Image (tube, grey):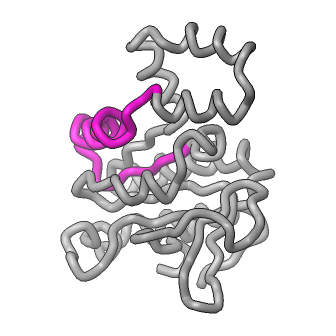
Amino acid sequence: MFTFDHITQGEPYLADTLSSTRFLQSADDFSNSSCFVAPYDPAQQPECEQMVAALVHDLATRGHIACVVNAYDLFLQIMDEDEIWEPYAEAQRDMPPAEFINALRDAVDIENVFVPRMHEAVRSARAELLIVTGMGACHPIIRAHRLVELLNPGVPVVVMFPGRQTTLPNGKRTLDVLTTPAGTGGGKYRARNIFDF
């Protein structure tokens, strides 16, 4: 396992791993998952964004196209296109937080609209891999484990994950976003830790 103190230290490892034939062909290998998470300390979010930009550039210099989709930006873009962002923003003033979060979860169809838009971004870019950012800003409206379940763009996927992946004594792995207590996050289902690849 590759370990680091700061997410920026992970860029050379990620560039080497994400440009490897083994990784790039993982979407064709039905015996292996091609969806990965890259956990990092949530306090390092600004540096993670800079690292992803450097990573994409590094991959391009190696001849590989990565499509980066910020999940939060995409969520807001869809709400704007549907002209529902402003009504929801106004409704927030009068709604309890938990009720507002549930309303936002229903605002954008994750399975039939959100994920297909990510797949289309990959196709449009003719990318060899998809990097998803913005998951911390989307939580708890879009949960990483649900997104990981639905993503299948035909290329390997790396979800930059502000939190940690925890392995429980029974072998089950959870994705614990932001400051969620270890082992209480949603199940990882098919995602593997890219730093274990």
Residue drawn at point x = 28 percent, y = 37 percent: 112
Question: Between residues 23 and 113, which one lies in front from this camera angle?
Answer: 113
Residue 121 within the segment the image draws in magenta: yes
- Dominant secondary structure of the residues highlighted in magenta in the image: helix
- In the rendered view, does 171 fall on the left or right side of 43? left
Answer with the quarter of the image where residue 184 lies. Answer: bottom right
Q: Is residue 85 above or below residue 56?
A: above
Residue 53 at least partly seen: no
Answer with the quarter of the image where residue 186 lies. Answer: bottom right
Residue drawn at point x = 34 percent, y = 40 percent: 118
Answer with the quarter of the image where residue 179 lies. Answer: bottom right
> Which quadrant, please, contains the N terminus?
bottom right
Residue drawn at point x = 46 percent, y = 31 percent: 106
> Percent x, y for residue 39?
62, 64
Task: Please give the range of residues in magenta.
Answer: 107-133
Residue 195 within the segment the image draws in magenta: no
> Percent x, y for residue 187?
52, 69
Residue drawn at point x = 78 percent, y = 69 percent: 5
